[in-house]
Image (cartoon, grey):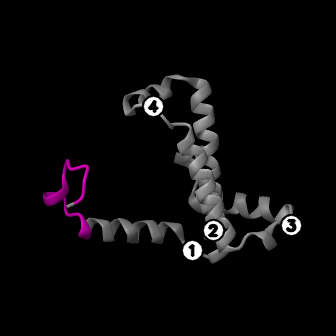
């Protein structure tokens, strides 16, 4: 399986089965999952702590560092998928709606090439 061949629903099913098989659904409430997303995101961020932005680009060529990044990023996404399952959120709809809102909020002609928002 890879990104090109796997749907979001396939991934949600993998997470759903993982949680179900361990009888963890009782622990997967929105508050605890949201906390877990933040905790895992902090663990991802910690891999970049105290380095310069240019140094972070070099991680792509460090297999050990990439494995750590992949693991932490996967943890964040796993909890996001679990949140979507718990609250029955269609992620495709949510993402496309958010991109549309952001497109209206940050029109290309005003924000192209700008790293800060005015």
Is the residue marked by circle 4 packed among few (<14), some (14-19), or many (20+) residues within 10 Å? few
Q: As displayed, is residue 82 above or below residue 39?
A: below
Q: Which residue is mark 2?
A: 83
Upstream in sequence: badge 2 or badge 3: 3
Q: Report whether 92 appears left or right of 9.
A: left
Q: Is residue 51 above or below residue 117?
A: above
Cβ–Cβ under 8 Å for marks 1 and 2: yes
SS for dot 1? loop
Q: Earlier in the sequence, mark 3 or mark 4?
A: 3
Of badges 1 and 4, the one in the foreground is: 4
Q: Earlier in the sequence, mark 3 or mark 1?
A: 3
Q: Which residue is mark 1?
A: 89
Rounded to the nearest whole Å, what is the CA distance between mark 1 and mark 2?
A: 8 Å
Residue 66: % across, % down: 57, 31
Q: Quadrant of the N terminus?
A: top right
**Front: mark 2 or 4:** 4
Q: Disc 2 to disc 3, how far (Cα)?
A: 16 Å
Judging by the rendered image, the residue that carries numbered circle 3 is: 23
Residue 1 in view in this figure: no
Q: Give residue 51's mark.
A: 4
- Element at badge 2? helix
Q: Is residue 118 left or right of residue 34?
A: left
Q: Earlier in the sequence, mark 1 or mark 4?
A: 4
Tell me where residue 44 sits by quadrant. top right
- Across and down, in percent, residue 14 comes to 71, 57
- The answer to whether 15 appears left or right of 22 in the picture is left
Residue ID at (62%, 26%): 64
Residue occupying image coordinates x 57% and y 57%:
7
Which comes before the other along the chain, label 1 or label 2? 2
């Amino acid at each position: 399986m890879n990104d090109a061949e796997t749907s979001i629903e396939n991934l949600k099913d993998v997470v759903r089965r993982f949680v179900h098989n361990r009888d963890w659904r009782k622990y997967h409430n929105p508050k605890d999952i949201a906390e877990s997303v933040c905790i895992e995101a902090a663990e991802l961020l910690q891999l970049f702590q105290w380095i310069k932005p240019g140094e972070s680009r070099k991680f792509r060529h460090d297999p050990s560092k990439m494995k750590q990044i992949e693991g932490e990023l996967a943890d964040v996404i796993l909890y996001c998928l679990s949140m979507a399952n718990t609250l029955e959120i269609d992620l495709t709809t949510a993402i496309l709606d958010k991109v549309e809102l952001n497109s209206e909020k940050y029109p290309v002609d005003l924000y192209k090439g700008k790293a800060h928002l005015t």
